[in-house]
């Protein structure tokens, strides 16, 4: 069998350690990938003098699949997010962020199973019209919603619902106030919903969604929404299942897909070997499931790794601090490998 090549971007902060953990597990599970390592973000700036080298873009374009660690973005100024640049460059319009409860995690709920589908290239993150007045007394940014963008992301959500046998799609908006942008998104999403009468459709304003999610997460199945709301809601959802260490995300386009953690580079715990690697391991599982659409063997590997993770977390003796244990990243990874 030909060996499949995956582009690997270790990333910043805790990135390299948790990406390495995921690679060790993929190897131990017998996935037989070839890895093309590439730099992006601060690491790339230090090594190559640029944040997103052409070689990195070429490797992602050639391999079509990348596993990526988090990248640091300076707050209120500095360079534009490399994550956003990658999503726009490869037109990765769908950000698929599932959260599923794992027995043994310290969380308020034990039966959460929600997928947030976040529009990934438009909305407030389009980068258009960002200006700050020279007197520093006012600032502007533009939010962009297109019919095409809204249609393809809601189509993606409903198709996923059909494929995965899900029952309900909740369209999340703020069309009562943001009548033009959120209004268009809602209008187009309603049109798409009509094509899927077998799936229950629910509409909810984003603020009400936040309250309902923390009180009744069982009322949600698939959520589809614009870029900024999806970003915030998916972190909220991570909080329902034990924190950001358990939340993966897939950035999917027509050609290329990049798999990563929902969380960032966690500078507060970087270099201490205490980060929970599960977010990137779950992203690697998403990657295997994506490849599994053409290759059933990959689907089996995904199941193998997921059940080893479940067993290790349920057992609870060798898990990281955020999951209530005191194991290092390396020890936790080793324990998952032992359970494969
Ligand atoms: P963060 O997500 O990095 O961290 C938030 C909190 O969660 C921190 O207390 C951190 O220690 C904890 N945490 C995150 N991942 C963890 C893990 N795997 N195990 C245990 N604890 C974990 O958010 P932040 O500190 O606001 O952002 C840091 C940087 O990351 C910023 O530059 C931001 O722009 C960037 N960021 C990148 C991405 C990405 O690359 N996709 C996503 C979000 C933020």
Image (cartoon, helix red, strand yellow):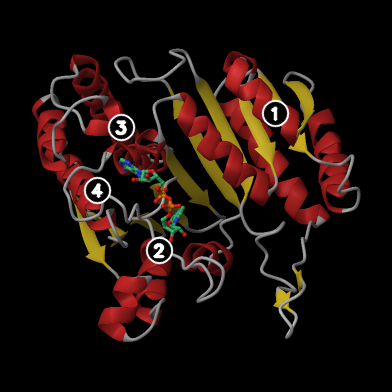
| Label 4 SS | helix
Residue 18 got which mark? 4
Q: Is the CB of mark 4 within 8 Å of ligand 1?
A: yes
Q: Earlier in the sequence, mark 1 or mark 2?
A: 2
- How far apart, in angstroms, are the residues tagged by discs 4 and 2? 15 Å
Nearer the observer: mark 4 or 3; the answer is 4
Nearer the observer: mark 4 or 2; the answer is 2
Residue 302 got which mark? 3
Q: Are marks 1 and 2 in contact (CB under 8 Å)?
A: no
- How far apart, in angstroms, are the residues tagged by discs 1 and 2? 29 Å
Q: Are marks 4 and 3 in contact (CB under 8 Å)?
A: no
Q: Which residue in the protein does label 2 denote?
A: 72
Nearer the observer: mark 2 or 3; the answer is 2
Q: Which residue in the protein does label 1 denote?
A: 209
Q: Is the CB of mark 2 within 8 Å of ligand 1?
A: yes
Q: Residue at x 39, y 62 (%)?
A: 71
Q: Residue at x 78, y 29 (%)?
A: 204
- How far apart, in angstroms, are the residues tagged by discs 1 and 3? 31 Å
Q: Is the CB of mark 3 within 8 Å of ligand 1?
A: no
Where residue 63 appears, as percent x and y from the top left, is: 36, 62
- How far apart, in angstroms, are the residues tagged by discs 2 and 3? 28 Å
């Amino acid at each position: 069998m030909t060996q499949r090549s995956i582009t690997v971007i270790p990333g910043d902060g805790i990135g390299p350690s948790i990406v390495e953990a995921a690679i060790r597990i993929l190897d131990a599970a017998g996935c037989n990938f070839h890895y093309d390592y590439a730099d992006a973000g601060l690491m790339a700036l230090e090594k190559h003098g640029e944040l997103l080298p052409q070689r990195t873009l070429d490797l992602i374009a050639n391999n079509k699949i990348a596993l990526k660690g988090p990248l640091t973005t300076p707050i209120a100024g500095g360079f534009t997010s490399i994550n956003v640049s990658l999503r726009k460059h490869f037109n990765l319009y769908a950000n698929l962020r599932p959260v599923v409860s794992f027995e043994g995690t310290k969380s308020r709920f034990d039966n959460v199973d929600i997928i947030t589908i976040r529009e990934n290239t438009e909305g407030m993150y389009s980068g258009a019209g960002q200006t700050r007045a020279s007197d520093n007394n006012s600032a502007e940014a533009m939010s962009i919603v297109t019919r095409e963008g809204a249609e393809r992301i809601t189509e993606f959500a409903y198709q996923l619902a059909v494929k995965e046998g899900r029952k309900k799609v909740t369209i999340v908006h703020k069309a009562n106030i943001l009548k033009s942008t959120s209004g268009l998104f809602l209008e187009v999403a309603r049109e798409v919903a009509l094509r899927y009468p077998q799936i229950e459709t629910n509409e909810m304003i984003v603020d009400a969604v936040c309250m309902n999610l923390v009180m009744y997460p069982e009322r949600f199945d698939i959520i589809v929404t614009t870029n900024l709301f999806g970003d915030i809601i998916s972190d909220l959802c991570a909080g329902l299942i034990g924190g950001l260490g358990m939340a993966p995300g897939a950035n999917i386009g027509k050609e290329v897909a990049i798999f990563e953690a929902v969380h960032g580079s966690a500078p507060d715990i970087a270099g201490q070997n205490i980060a929970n690697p599960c977010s990137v391991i779950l992203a690697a599982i998403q990657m295997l499931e994506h490849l599994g659409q053409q290759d059933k063997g990959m689907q089996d590997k995904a199941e193998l790794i997921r059940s080893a993770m479940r067993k290790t977390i349920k057992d609870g003796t060798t898990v990281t601090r955020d999951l209530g244990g005191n194991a290092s990243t390396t020890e936790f990874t080793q324990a998952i490998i032992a359970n494969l």
